């Protein structure tokens, strides 16, 4: 492939590219700030030029690609990003919210989140500049520094938090399948392998998959994951509906103390927020769709992207409402934190569903890890470190080890959903899209977008505050009786 001072093409690094000062990378020079301020009134988006140049020179994971992605890719990427571990916790959220409030909140969440996605998709490309990352749009809307440090912390909580939950989910699924398929299953003489061992196995699988360089190269894995998520959701719906209302299933909080009920409601809000995480990767997904400047449309990728999102969200409604309502109907207040374990029978069907869950989270882990990889590589190339295979092997392996270790330390599925969902998804799913829309489009009080945006922001604040309290309380209670590193 030719040699430069060290295998240029192998490392995907332009031979003449040099690290730039931090203020140029973040667009915080005076001219960058001026360009950002001018952009809202129709001026140029100057500070994005350098970011786009780096994407082209270094082939960063989240900077778009020269792919032929279409609405089809957008659809299954969004399904993979949305329908994940969170769907299995929705029946447990219904336990505390109960029928009227549960149905209302889940429906409002579905409407509010698709509205937020539409806002982000419409803001993806402005004046010929594409915002390929969530924080880039934040920088444009709120200012280079404020936008960066507002979005990045929440986005990292979401990405890393999801990967932790996926480690726990896959580990528990593997453990369940082993316990119910080993030779000594019926006599309860299976050799014991604790949850931590299965999380390690999942982490090793992720180390292999992590060598996929960017979003578009994940297409096959993401498609398989999307099929699996719809399949195990269908199994959960079908088995729950077939089981019907179980003896002793009640739709009230009579078996809970007042404190348990209150904190449970708080945690339920976070669990529902956790279920809608696609906003954190929607711009990265949209960046894989090629833009045609000659189309005469300001944002030519918006139409195919939104078409894919509508298809994804139709399936999201089927999975979320189906699993949430059917699971709660079957078990009522006795529903566990993960509906599959509440179902239990027939064993072979549940084992098939658990295998599908394992396959799905293998893909979802990488979808949400990709923006983290992108942030790491961005910092590395800025300092002159080539982002080829050796570099990716080292930093991605280290990342997976850290995430798996945290998963082994706090494997509390239900409470993790609520805590991470509130702290990360509340702002990034409900608040930020509407904040950016208000800052960039500046709709007046006479516009329904003005009131819809403020409604979403208010929902995000409530979810963040109450859901985080409920999730943390649950983690503290679980940790008091849990034996670590089994």
Image: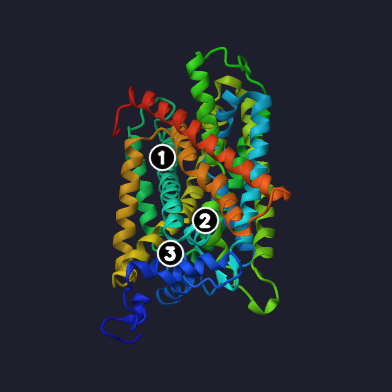
Helix, strand or loop at mark 1: helix
The answer to whether residue 243 is seen in the rendering is no
Instruction: Say which residue appears at 64% left-offset and 36% top-offset.
Output: 106
Mark closest to the chain's N terminus, 3 or 1: 1
Characterize the local packing of mark 2: few (<14), some (14-19) or many (20 or more) Cα atoms within 10 angstroms.
many
Q: Nearer the viewer, residue 216 or 185?
A: 216
Which residue is under mark 2? 281
Mark closest to the chain's N terminus, 1 or 2: 1
Label 2 with label 3: CB-CB less than 8 Å: no
Q: Is residue 365 left or right of residue 479?
A: right
Q: Position of residue 201 (x, y in %)?
A: 35, 47
Q: Nearer the viewer, residue 153 or 62?
A: 153
Q: How many marks?
A: 3
Q: Position of residue 428 (x, y in %)?
A: 51, 48
Mark 2 vs mark 3, foreground winner is 2
Which residue is under mark 1? 168
The answer to whether residue 207 is seen in the rendering is yes
Which residue is under mark 3? 212
Instruction: Say which residue appears at 53% left-offset and 35% top-offset.
Output: 463
Q: Is residue 441 left or right of residue 139?
A: right
Whole-angstrom CA distance, mark 3 to mark 1, is: 22 Å
Q: Position of residue 287 (x, y in %)?
A: 55, 66
Quadrant of the rendering where the C terminus is positioned: top left
Q: Nearer the viewer, residue 270 or 458?
A: 458
Q: Position of residue 44 (x, y in %)?
A: 55, 73
């Amino acid at each position: 492939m030719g040699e430069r001072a060290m295998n240029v093409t192998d490392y995907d690094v332009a031979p003449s590219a040099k690290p730039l000062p931090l203020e140029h990378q973040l667009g915080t020079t005076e001219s960058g700030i001026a360009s950002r301020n001018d952009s809202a009134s129709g001026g140029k988006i100057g500070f994005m030029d350098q970011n786009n140049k780096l994407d082209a020179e270094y082939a960063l994971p989240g900077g778009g690609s020269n792919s032929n992605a279409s609405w089809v890719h957008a659809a299954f990427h969004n399904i993979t990003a949305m329908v994940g571990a969170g769907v299995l916790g929705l029946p447990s959220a219904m336990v505390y919210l109960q029928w009227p409030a549960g149905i209302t909140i889940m429906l409002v969440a579905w409407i509010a989140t698709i509205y937020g996605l539409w806002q982000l998709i419409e803001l993806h490309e402005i004046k010929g500049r594409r915002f390929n990352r969530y924080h880039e749009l934040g920088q444009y809307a709120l200012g280079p520094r404020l936008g960066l440090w507002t979005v990045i912390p929440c986005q990292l909580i979401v990405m890393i938090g999801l990967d932790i939950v996926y480690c726990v989910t896959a580990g528990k699924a593997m453990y369940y399948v082993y316990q119910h398929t080993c030779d000594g299953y019926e006599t309860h003489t299976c050799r014991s392998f604790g949850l931590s061992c299965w999380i390690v196995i999942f982490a090793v699988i992720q180390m292999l998959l992590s060598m996929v360089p960017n979003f578009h190269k994940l297409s096959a894995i993401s498609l398989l994951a999307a099929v699996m998520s719809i399949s195990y959701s269908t199994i959960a719906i079908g088995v729950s509906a077939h089981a019907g209302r179980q003896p002793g299933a009640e739709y009230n909080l009579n078996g809970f103390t007042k404190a348990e009920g209150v904190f449970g409601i708080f945690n339920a809000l976070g669990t529902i927020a956790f279920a809608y995480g696609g906003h954190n990767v929607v711009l990265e997904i949209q960046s894989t769709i090629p833009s045609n400047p000659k189309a005469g449309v300001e944002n030519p990728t918006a139409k195919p992207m939104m078409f894919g999102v509508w298809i994804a969200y139709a399936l999201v409604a089927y999975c979320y409402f189906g699993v949430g309502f059917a699971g709660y109907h079957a078990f009522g207040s006795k529903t566990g934190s993960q509906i599959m374990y509440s179902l239990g029978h027939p064993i072979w069907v549940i084992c098939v569903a658990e295998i599908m869950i394992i396959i799905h989270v293998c893909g979802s882990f990488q979808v949400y890890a990709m923006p983290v990889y992108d942030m790491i590589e961005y910092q590395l190339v800025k300092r002159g470190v080539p982002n080829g295979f050796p570099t990716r092997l080292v930093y991605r392996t280290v990342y997976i080890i850290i995430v798996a270790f945290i998963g082994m330390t706090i494997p509390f599925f239900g409470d993790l959903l609520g805590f991470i969902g509130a702290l990360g998804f509340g702002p990034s799913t409900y608040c930020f899209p509407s904040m950016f829309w208000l800052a960039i489009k500046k709709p007046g009080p006479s516009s329904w977008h003005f009131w819809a945006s403020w409604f979403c922001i208010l929902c995000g604040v409530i979810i963040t505050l109450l859901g985080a309290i409920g999730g943390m309380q649950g983690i503290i209670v679980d940790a008091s009786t849990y034996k670590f590193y089994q």
